[in-house]
Image: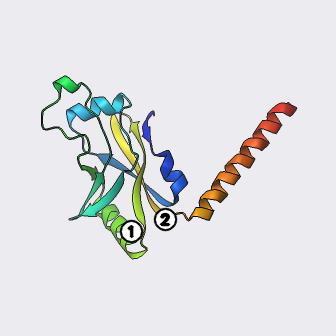
Amino acid sequence: MSHYAENRKARFDYEIIEKYESGIEFLGVEVKSVRGGQMSLEGAFVIVRGGEAFLINSNIPPYQAKNTPKDYDPLRNRRLLLTKKEIAELAGNAKNRSLTIVPISVYNKGRKIKVEIALVKGKKKFDKRETTKKRETDREIRRDMRGKE
């Protein structure tokens, strides 16, 4: 299993409550671009509309710019392949508890490309400071442990 794209900012900005694995609907041009590692999840989010889930604002540049159709939009909305039960659960939780749905990573599972999405709650500024402080102390502890061996 190899990772094609990761949303590192999401882990810092949000507190992850629940994760889901989803398929994603691509065009043929986009699949090659994603497998080439050119996808960006920065600023992307998921909305549920009309009983379907869509990935919004994810950027997939064309694989070969000169061979790409003229009307290709790299920021187009992409449908996520979830069951009706999962979509209803996501929509209900996001609406009732005022949560957000964001993509965490894109990876392959066999020949399929999957998206890991998460139900998240935004962190406050002091929570972000706490996360940064914890990360720095862990880094210092690892550095000290390495020096003692």
Q: Nearer the viewer, residue 51 or 125?
A: 125
Residue 110 at x, y percent in the picture: 38, 34
Q: Secondary structure at mark 1?
A: helix
Residue 112 at x, y percent in the picture: 33, 37
Q: Is residue 17 left or right of residue 46?
A: right
Q: Earlier in the sequence, mark 1 or mark 2?
A: 1
Q: Which residue lies most toward the bottom here?
A: 96
Q: Which residue is mark 2?
A: 121
Q: Which residue is mark 1?
A: 94
Residue at the spot x=72%, y=42% of the render? Answer: 139
Q: Nearer the viewer, residue 52 or 64?
A: 64
Q: Amino acid at mark 2?
A: Lys
Residue 80 at x, y percent in the picture: 29, 51
For the residues labelled 1 and 2, the Cα–Cα distance comes to 9 Å
Identify the image quadrant of the C terminus: top right
Q: How is the image coloured?
A: rainbow
